[in-house]
Image (cartoon, rainbow, N blue to C red):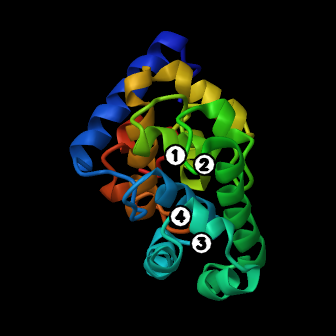
Amino acid sequence: MPRESKKARSARAAEIYDLLTAEYPDAHCELDFEDAFQLAVATILSAQTTDERVNMVTPVLFARYPNAEALASAQQEDVEEIVRSTGFFRNKAKNIIGFARGLMADHHGEVPASMDALAVLPGVGRKTANVILGNAFGLAEGVVVDTHVKRLSTLLGLTKEKTPEKIERDLMALFPPERWTLLSHLLIWHGRRVCIARRPQCADCTLSRLCPSSTI
C-alpha cells in the first residue's frame, strides 16, 4: 500500500469499523460477569489463557467468594486450587486477592469507575482498567490493546507502534471515543475467527481490500 495520508487512514479506519460491525453485530466481551467486581477478577484471570477457560473457573470462584470482602479474606492456597487451570495460578491468585483487599482498604469494597483509581490496584493495569470501565460502566477512557488488537492493528496498517500504550494512542486518534470499547471487541472477534495468527483466512476476510497485509 502506498504512503497514506492521515485523512486517508482515518477514512479507511472508519470503513474497517463499519465492515466489522456488519460482520459481527453481536460482538461483546466474552468473559461472563454480573457486575464490575466479577468482570475485574475475570479479566485478571484471563491473562495468558482463553475466555472460555476463565468462564469455566469463575462460577466456582464467585460461588465461594461472591464479593470483595469474601475474596479479601480468602486463603491463597484455596484460591490457587480454584484458578489452577487458568495457568500462572499462584500469581493470579495473589493478584485477585490483592485486588479485593485494595477495594476493601480504599473503596469500601466497591470497584471504582475511575482510570486513576483502578490502574493502581493490584493486578490492574491500563488494559484491565479499560476493560472494566468500558464494559461494566460504559465509560470510554481508552482502547483495550490485547494481543489480538495489537496484531490486527499492525496488520491493518492502523499503527506502526510496538508497545500497547503507543498503539492505544494511535487507535484513539483514529476512532471517536464512542467507538473505542466496541472497536476492541470487533478486532478481537475478527482475530479469533478469521484473522487467526497462524492461519489467516484472507480469502474469507471482509477487510481484504483494505488490508495492506492481505495475501489476495
Q: CA distance from mark 4 to mark 1?
A: 10 Å
Q: CA distance from mark 2 to mark 4?
A: 10 Å
Q: Amino acid at mark 4?
A: Ala
Instruction: Name the residue rendered at 48%, 63% in the picture.
Output: 196
Q: Which dot marks residue 131?
A: 1
| Residue 5 occupies quadrant | top right
Compared to 190, does 45 lie above or below?
Answer: below
The foreground one among 20 and 89 is: 89
Q: Which dot marks residue 49?
A: 3
Q: Position of residue 140 (x, y in %)?
A: 47, 29
| Residue 89 occupies quadrant | bottom right
Q: Earlier in the sequence, mark 2 or mark 4?
A: 4
Q: Position of residue 125 (x, y in %)?
A: 70, 45
Q: CA distance from mark 1 to mark 3?
A: 16 Å
Q: Amino acid at mark 1?
A: Val
Instruction: Name the residue rendered at 35%, 34% in the picture.
Output: 17
The foreground one among 181 and 151 is: 181
Q: Do labels 1 and 2 touch, CB within 8 Å?
A: yes
| Residue 177 occupies quadrant | top left
Q: Which dot marks residue 128?
A: 2
Figure label count: 4
Q: Amino acid at mark 3?
A: Thr
Q: Residues within 10 Å of mark 4 (few under 14, many from 20)?
A: many
Q: Earlier in the sequence, mark 4 or mark 1?
A: 4
Q: Residues within 10 Å of mark 3 (few under 14, many from 20)?
A: few
Residue 7 appears left or right of 41:
left
Answer yes or no: is residue 160 visible. no
